[in-house]
Image: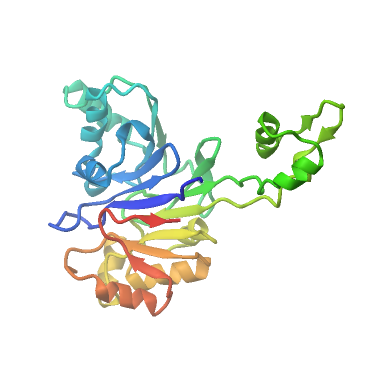
Amino acid sequence: MVKAMRVIPLGTSSGKPTLRRNVSALAVAREGDWLLFDCGEGTQTQIIRAGLNPSRLAAIFITHLHGDHFNGLAGLLSTMGMDRRERQLTLIAPIGIREYLDTLARLKILFVNYPLQVREIDKDELPPNALTQVYETAEYVVSSCPLDHRIFALGYRLDEKPKPGRFNVERARELGVPVGPLFSRLQSGKEVQLDDGSIVHPAEVLGAERPGKSVTYCLDTRPCAASKTLARDADLLIHEATYTEEFFEEAQHYGHSTAMQAATIAREAQAKRLLLTHFSTRYPDVTPLLEEAQAIFSETRTAQDLIEVNV
């Protein structure tokens, strides 16, 4: 059985860590590999605690170049070098990340001896309020869209590609397909030829195509049209909720969202579920943020470091 896609918050505090919450980082784990969104200070320790294998990390996506979202990057990249990683790693981030890494490497702070593919995204490269694909595998794509923060910031959306319909074993047998490799070929969407020369097409033995799951990651941002674009019909929207409405003006000034605003985005984008994160340290208890959001969007929960959320 294919395992569900899992979302694992590795850091849920804004600005600085607390004893219970690290700064921003989040893993999306799938069968065989996982992706990292943001990499605040201390992320590699959280990766160990979450039981994630760094050798299976396929790509890292940085939202913006504020320290609480990428100060842990150099340490994580260097640790994988010390562990003799050989697999290529993709890093996607706003422009400036390459200069940062080159400087650390020149100072002998960064140690990378494996293929590292860096893609920098400039603020003029992506159209506003539209998804642009930035990463693709055989099973999923990751798209991005600029958000509304104090500096250039990116939101990300992961979409699994549609899966073939369920295989009808009895129908395949009725058509004369022998159990074995031909079953697998049909399940993968390819036609097969039988010994008598007849052709069996996948549509004859497969049910309706099954849509993949989708996850949206929106940190840090004021409420904006891009957030809705990223979150449209998403199975899970992960959205910052730095403040309650009491601090609306502060949120606006610093380029953040309140819990109520995050919930409104989820409702208007028709997302299925909302996971709040990036909480101000003024909230040792995040219940007020949860209650504020649930009054707008009932399918809301608050993130805790190292919980697992199945998608």
The residue sitting at the bottom extreme is 295
Residue 43 falls in image quadrant: top left
Give me the residue at 66% from left, 39% from top.
187
Tell me if residue 50 comes above or below residue 242 in the rendering: above
Residue 44 placement (x, y as % from top left): 23, 40
Q: Residue at x 36, y 48 (%)?
A: 152
Q: Tell me which residue sits at (39%, 41%) in the image.
A: 35
Question: Where is residue 110 drawn, in percent x and y?
Answer: 21, 26
Q: Is residue 80 visible?
A: yes
Please state the horizontal and vertical placement of residue 296, each as a whole percent of the image.
Answer: 42, 77
Quadrant location, the C terminus? bottom left
In this view, the residue in front, 176 or 87, is: 176
Q: Is residue 148 left or right of residue 76?
A: right
Residue 273: % across, % down: 45, 65
Q: Is residue 29 above or below residue 217?
A: above
The one of 210 and 152 positioned closer to us in this rendering: 210
Whether residue 155 is visible to the viewer of this picture, yes or no, is: no
